[in-house]
Image: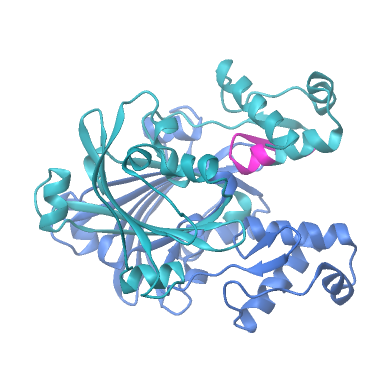
Chain colours: A cyan, B blue
């Protein structure tokens, strides 16, 4: 982790620990520089990172303010590989249904930019929140990049393992959202009636070098699913 | 618009005009600097903006590459006030059902940080895509900020008017997504069966100074709705 990322993490922790509310003002730049003993350019990079993450907003000529929403129990859609953090008040567990090495489907091959002859790790799992089904996931990992997975790894956070175990850098993702009706298999997995509302998210995750390594299809239990997104003006 | 924003727009246009595909490499920094006759710091800011917008990705020591997804007909969820841009291949129209000045509901007052005695513009409209219902919207605008609306304005892009007509700077938004079943009123508006899947998005839009000015509730026709989101690593 680079210096400015460390400082950003500390500022974020400070906001959480002190339960600062939206609109509360942070100390001025000079005070932050002195407090963390870093240069102006480092603290500026830290604050830019926090702004992009939606933790603060900066008002030119006026200061840096806390950004925070008021609702509890919402999952951040843009950090969906980190359920546990968003839902730390809840108890989240996984049940691995299938894990094997196989050839990709046409759809998975297209989304991963690989051929039908390449190998993928296929992972199918159910995730639970407080004992209720949260979602049903199918993921295809390009085995040339994600060289090893086992049942223990996929029972926990696969992305933590990819970052820390394999030392890979996750870059960006494309997500496609659909709403439809559950088919029979999905309904059984989620413990809902056939034809119930279905919230379905396909994601393609890329390394920082642009290579896609994971194509995931996640079907959520609509009764357990509330999501939030924080957007900045450049996205509006 | 600042210089680096202008340049960013030109680069984006170049990518679109030349139909560059994901992974294609852009000219090196020096070439871009010469081409646009700007300093290194300006071109760097332009590229950072394009990276945050998901138009390019930068690989350290290797170059700048085009980022682009392959699917057509998806609406960008993070620029949902700009349907027309995402859906320019389609024909989008609006039907204004109600427009008046009133006192806010408790929910709207809470989300806009105003009191029950303050005034809001209330807008209820239906939006159509190729003659099919796309969504049913209810919006509450803080009248102290959005001082004037009329039927003509709300038939078109309200956000264009807010930016260009009122000269306000839109800063950031918080979005809350839910999936549920349509009630009778919603089903009638959308032309779907009662109890059909419902994709429901609440948004709170803030000015750059942090003031919330718009609380919107949008219910989508699930048959017409496919969304995409581009996320960067700092969000994952």
Is residue B173 rendered to the left or right of residue B222?
right
**Quadrant in which the C terminus of chain A is drawn:** bottom right
For the point 79% across and 24% down, which residue is it? A32
- Left or right position of A137 against B100: left
- Foreground pick, A59 / B119: A59
Q: Quadrant of residue B192?
A: bottom left
Depicted B35 relative to depicted A207: above or below? below
Is B64 on the left-hand or right-hand side of B101? right
Q: Residue at x 80, y 59 (%)?
A: B44
Identified at 66% across, 25% down, the residue is: A10
Q: Nearer the viewer, residue B172 or A1?
A: A1
The residue closer to the viewer here, B102 or A92, is A92
Residue A58 lies in magenta, yes or no?
Answer: yes
Per the rendered image, the range of residues in magenta is A49-61
Q: In this rendering, is residue B120 above or below B18?
A: above
- Total marks in image: 0
Report x, y in % for residue B23.
60, 72
The answer to which quarter of the image holds residue B27 is bottom right
Q: Does residue A47 show up magenta in the picture?
A: no
Locate residue A135, reporting x and y percent: 26, 45
Image coords of residue B174 (percent x, y): 49, 42
Along the horizontal axis of the image, is B153 left or right of B44?
left
Q: Is residue A62 visible?
A: yes
- Can the viewer see residue A59 in this picture? no
Quadrant location of the N terminus of chain A in the rendered image: top right
Rendering coords of residue B98 (x, y %): 36, 54
Q: Residue most toward the top?
A: A18
Out of A116 and A174, give the one closest to the viewer: A116
Quadrant for residue B67, please give it. bottom right
């Amino acid at each position: 982790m680079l210096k400015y990322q460390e400082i950003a993490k500390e500022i974020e922790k400070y906001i959480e620990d002190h339960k600062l509310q939206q609109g509360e003002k942070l100390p001025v730049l000079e005070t932050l520089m002195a407090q963390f003993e870093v240069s102006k350019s480092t603290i500026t990079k830290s604050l830019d990172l926090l702004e992009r993450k939606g933790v603060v907003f900066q008002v030119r000529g006026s200061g840096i303010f806390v950004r925070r929403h008021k609702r509890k129990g919402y999952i951040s859609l843009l950090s969906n590989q980190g359920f546990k953090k968003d839902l730390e008040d809840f108890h989240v567990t996984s049940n691995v249904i299938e894990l094997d090495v196989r050839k990709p489907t046409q759809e998975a091959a297209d989304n991963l930019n690989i051929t039908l002859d390449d190998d993928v790790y296929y992972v199918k799992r159910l995730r639970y929140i407080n004992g209720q089904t949260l979602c049903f996931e199918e993921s295809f990992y390009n085995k040339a990049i994600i060289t090893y997975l086992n049942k223990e790894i996929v029972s926990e956070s696969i992305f933590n393992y990819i970052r820390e175990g394999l030392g890979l850098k996750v870059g960006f993702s494309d997500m496609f959202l659909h709403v439809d009706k559950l088919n029979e298999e999905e309904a059984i997995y989620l413990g809902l009636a056939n034809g119930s509302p279905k919230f379905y998210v396909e994601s393609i995750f890329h390394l920082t070098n642009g290579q896609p390594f994971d194509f995931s299809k996640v079907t959520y239990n609509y009764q357990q699913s509330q999501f939030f997104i924080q957007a900045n003006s450049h996205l509006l």
